[in-house]
Amino acid sequence: MITVISGTNRRASESLMFARKFVDFLQEHGREEVKLLSLESIPHDWFHPDMYEKEGQTESLITLQDEYITGADKYLIVCPEYNGSIPGSLKLFLDACSVRNYATNFRRKKAALVGVATGRAGNLRGIDHLTSIMHHMGAIIMPAYLPISRIGDLMEEGTILDENTLSVMEQFVINFLAF
C-alpha cells in the first residue's frame, strides 16, 4: 500500500489538491492500493502532554496509524512551505506516530517528498528538513525531490492546469513506483 500524505491541516489547502492529483497518477500507473491521508481531516484529540506515552495515545491516533502508516510500504508526502520549513501539524503527527510501533512505521520503507510553495524555491529547505526527520525514523528517501514553485500560477479554481507541471508530476510518480 502507498500512503499519500497532504502535510497540512489547513482547510481546502492547495497541498491537498496536489496530493489528490498524485493519488490519481499512482492509481493510473501502479497496481498497489493507494490511500490519501489529509491532515486537515484528522481528529486532534491526541494532542496533549500524554501523547508521548504509549498509554496516553488515543484510539483515533492508533486507528490512523494502523490504517495509513504502519500498513504502508511507501509514502508520498506533499509538504507545503511554512516559514521556510514544514507545517507544525506534519511534524506533530510524525512525532505522535513515533511513540507506538516505532520500528515498523517508517523504518526501511520508501518515501518520495514533494514540496509546494507560492514562492520560487518549491519548499526545498522544508524538504531538506523533512528528509532529515524521515532519515532519523529510518525511511529510505527517493533521491530526487520534486519542488513545485509558484503554485498559484499553476492552478485555476482548484485544478492544476499547467501541462508541464502535470507532466513532471506524472513522471515523478512513474519514477517513484520504480523506486
Image (cartoon, helix red, strand yellow):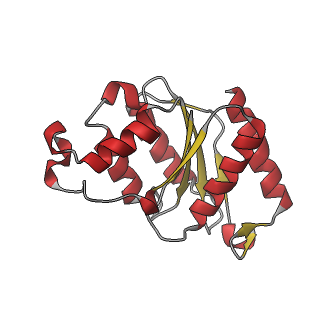
Residue 103, percent from left and from top: 34, 24
Residue 51, percent from left and from top: 20, 47
Residue at 62% of width from left, 67% of height from top? 119
Left/right of residue 176 with respect to residue 83 in the rendered view = right
Above or below: residue 101 compared with residue 25 = above
> From the image, which quarter does the C terminus lie in?
top right
Of residues 75 and 30, the one drawn nearer to the viewer in this rendering: 30
Of residues 94 and 32, the one drawn nearer to the viewer in this rendering: 32
Left/right of residue 145 with respect to residue 87 in the rendered view = right
Can residue 132 be seen from the camera position used here? no
Residue at 46% of width from left, 64% of height from top? 82
Residue 24, percent from left and from top: 71, 49
Residue 40 figure quarter: bottom left
Residue furthest out toward the right: 163
Residue 120 figure quarter: bottom right
Residue 172 figure quarter: top right
Of residues 34 and 95, the one drawn nearer to the viewer in this rendering: 34
Residue at 81% of width from left, 64% of height from top? 162
